[in-house]
Amino acid sequence: MRNLIISTFITVIMLTHFADLMAQNNPGSVWTYNNNPQKSGWNTGKLKNLKQFIIDSTQVTGLMVIHNGQVVFEYGDVQENSYIASCRKSILAMLYGKPVLKGQINLNSTLRSLNIDDLGGLLDIEKQATVRDVLSARSGVFHKASNPGDYLEFAPKRGSVKPGDFWLYSNWDFNVAGTIFEKQTGRSIYESLDQELAIPLKMQDWKKEIQRKYGDSTSSIHPAYHMWFSTRDMARLGLLMLNKGKWDDKYIIDSNWVNEMVKPRTQFTEVNEHIPAYKGSDYYFGYGYYWWLWQNVTDKRFEGGYSALGAIGQTISVFPKTKTVVVYKTKDTYDRETPYAARYRLIRLAVQCLDTD
């Protein structure tokens, strides 16, 4: 009887482990395609409408929908590397996990203690901002960044708010996070990306040599760490996030750090108040550590969802409730740009192609 109990216990453990591996279903060197998505609940009629929407209403150049680790829908060129705009910030947040765990980066360290400064000097109150404040876009440092594309024009007067008290989509915070990362780890962002994400995830198109920083050094000494990825490699990043940092049998990112990244640091009400384009809209994004969080959702398929979002039309969007990842890119050649409203509608349409009733 005792042997039977032990045997049954071992069998249960093995089956649980097997089910866990099957649930992850990570791609190897190439992606696996689900040739019968309808069997998995994907509405083929809606998928056709999704394709038509992409053609008629967007300038998207590559898109993939991943479900249970397999490709259920693909559009355009998913192999070409192109500029991913502000999605870079969410990827940097992913890289932060390891040095935080190792103690190389202390989230409670202040800018003063790290000797972080900028042109003209930071104010005393600004130097009190912590790394955590910077990663939350709540540093309260309203210094001009080296690159455009933020909402600094809507910031309060410098020195008027305490660090942690005010959320602002500020490229100064994002760029300084890159400076802090490299200073504390002694390693470039691109080298870390190469060794800690690209190689372990078996990215197919990643090229370290095309990545580069740039910015206006007369505005700020902290450059922007721009990134170029293919759609299918971005999908691997999304799947890694969906799997709580686990890839096959190894944690590439500590699962606790994944949870920390997507924990609300700012509610959608404050985000909407500080982004003019969101006021009065149906965009309900909270904010974590450089990830946008889907809040105030009425469709359960979006519960717990989060996104990396980039200008022109880029995203890595993860929806744990349905084990779905949606990624797309808009290559900016020939002044392509996917309209603002279409970017979010496209994500919604893609997720809603999965019938859950």
Image (cartoon, helix red, strand yellow):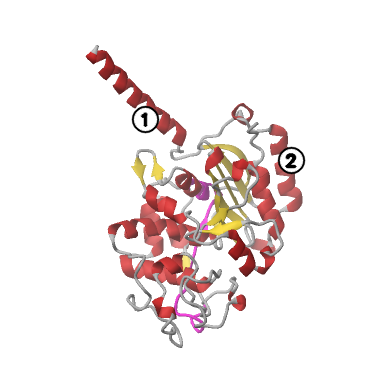
Q: Please indicate whether residue 130 sits to the left or right of residue 303 in the image.
A: left
Q: Is residue 294 positioned above or below 215 on the image? A: above
Q: How crowded is mark 2: few (under 14 residues within 10 Å), some or many (20 or more)?
A: some
Nearest the eye: 144 or 219: 144
Nearest the eye: 235 or 170: 170
Q: Is residue 249 positioned above or below 142 on the image? A: above
SS category of the residue bearing label 2: helix
Q: Which residue is drawn at 67% across and 69% down?
A: 276
- Can you tell which of label 2 and label 1 is closer to the viewer? 1
Question: Based on the displayed image, in which of its 4 quarters is residue 148 positioned?
Answer: bottom right
In reply to whether residue 228 is colored magenta, the answer given is: yes
Quarter the N terminus occupies: top left
**Residue topped by disc 2:** 49
Q: Is residue 87 positioned above or below 219 on the image? A: above
Q: Residue 304 carries which label?
A: none
Give the percent coordinates (x, y) of residue 314: 60, 56
Q: How many callouts does the rendering have?
A: 2
Give the percent coordinates (x, y) of residue 161: 51, 78
Quarter the C terminus occupies: top right
- Seen as rendered, the residue at the extreme bottom is 120
Q: Can residue 25 be seen in this view?
A: no
First along the sequence among labels 2 and 1: 1
Question: Based on the displayed image, in which of its 4 quarters is residue 112 positioned?
Answer: bottom left
- Given the image, on which type of amino acid does mark 2 rest? Asn
SS category of the residue bearing label 1: helix
- Given the image, on which type of amino acid does mark 1 rest? His
Q: Which residue is drawn at 63% across and 56% down?
A: 284
Q: Residue at x 68, y 66 (%)?
A: 277
Asked whether the beta carbons under mark 2 and mark 1 sit within 8 Å of each other, the answer is no
**Residue topped by disc 1:** 17
Write down the region rendered in magenta.
216-236
